[in-house]
Image (cartoon, rainbow, N blue to C red):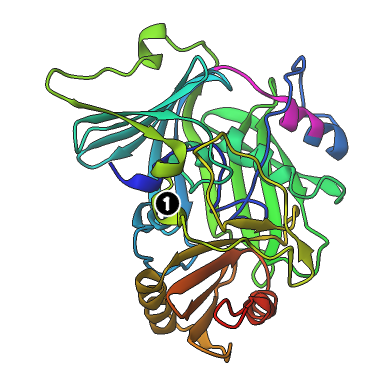
Amino acid sequence: MAAPRFSRRWLLVGAGALALVGVDALPRPAGPVADLPADALRERVLAATRRYVGVAESTARLGLPLLPQLESAVALLTGATRIRAFVASPERFRVDELTPVGERGTYRLDGREYGWDSDTDQLTVITGAAPLRLPRAADLLPPELARRLLRLAPGDPVQTIAARRVAGRNAAGLRLVPTDPATTIGRIDVWADDATGLPLRVEVAPRSAPEEPLLATAFSEVDDRAPDEADLLPQVPPGAGFVRADAGQIAGALRRLDAPDPPATLAGRALVPLTATPGSELPGVGLYGTGPAGFALFPVSREIADRAVDGAALAGGAGVDAGRGRAVVLATPLLTLAVLARGRRGTLLVGTVAADQLEQALLELPDRRRT
């Protein structure tokens, strides 16, 4: 099973599309949303925690190069993903990423998480909670993505936009345009079911080309019924493998036990406090900024950093003079990636911030050999 598919918090597409950390809103009574003013519609969308069964399709063109040991996460952000969901509540669900040859499923039951990979015939039971994690298909479901992105800028104004039909339903439109000048996000559009407020479609477009969404996810079919209990349980065929893994181990390339502590501030943004269960910590990993102009830092091996530097350079990244070692910043319309390979270690920075922000962060990283 690909290592970075599980744990609790999303690293790539969040607090600046690539590092979002959020908690579920408490459910409130749902009602018609078509005639609500924009602020009330935003609140209804955030509160629309409902049961449903559906199929969604996500298309992402975020321009990331292939990164060693992060291939499965990058694939979610650079191509098309078909997703099947059975959601009874935020703590009871099953979400499958449907592939041409099978499925990769995430199950949440009774406070525990499971991962199933039909390619390898292996069920993984995940224990503990890491402070950050890489994205998975469940994060691209319209209700989940809408709530996470709208929480990035709770104080920014919103406006209603033209309604549309999604999955055979009337859907009211809502637009948030971030006001932070450092973010690359130009607009976040959400269309929510008229009757329930459940988000049915989400689009994210860059500031440089707000008319062209680079991330779009929408239901092709959705049913408000509760999922069958059998659909929420992992169905493991005879002979399939069974393993247990800690959330920190599942984080794979993000877990560097010899990593130094992340700096208290980078590029004028403070380190966000994060928590993890004992044994699931990710040393050296840091999240900076809590709004749409945020980014994540995580340490990697020198080998991975060298390969990432080469990949970013081939994709059009610009070299940065960061003292010893090699450094590249790759700016895409929506995401910015910075890589530093220095000494025996490497550092990866990624977020929805302008290139100069991550270049400044690279320059502020301490040279551990000298300190």
Q: Residue furthest left?
A: 239
Q: 307 or 43, which is in the foreground?
A: 307
Assess disc 1: are there few (<14), some (14-19) or many (≥20) residues with their C-alpha within 10 Å of its C-alpha: many
Which quadrant, please, contains the C terminus?
bottom right
- In the rendered image, the vertical position of residue 226 relative to residue 22, given as above or below: above
Residue extent of the magenta highlight: 43-51
Residue 170 position within the rendered picture, expressed as x and y whole percent measured from the top left = 64, 29
Which quadrant, please, contains the N terminus?
top left
Residue found at x 50% / y 39%? 280
Residue 137 drawn in magenta: no
Q: 315 or 247, which is in the foreground?
A: 247
Residue 271 position within the rendered picture, expressed as x and y whole percent measured from the top left = 73, 57
- In the rendered image, the vertical position of residue 286 relative to residue 189, given as above or below: below
Q: Which residue is mark 1?
A: 76
Q: Amino acid at mark 1?
A: Leu
Residue 79 position within the rendered picture, expressed as x and y whole percent measured from the top left = 39, 56
Residue found at x 67% / y 39%? 22
Whether residue 125 is visible: yes
Q: Quadrant of residue 333?
A: bottom right
Q: Quadrant of residue 206?
A: bottom right
Q: Secondary structure at mark 1?
A: helix
- Total labels: the figure holds 1
Whether residue 335 is visible: no
- In the rendered image, the vertical position of residue 84 relative to residue 371, given as above or below: above
Q: 212 or 371, which is in the foreground?
A: 371
- In the rendered image, the vertical position of residue 139 relative to residue 62, given as above or below: above
Q: 366 or 171, which is in the foreground?
A: 366
Residue 96 position within the rendered picture, expressed as x and y whole percent measured from the top left = 37, 31
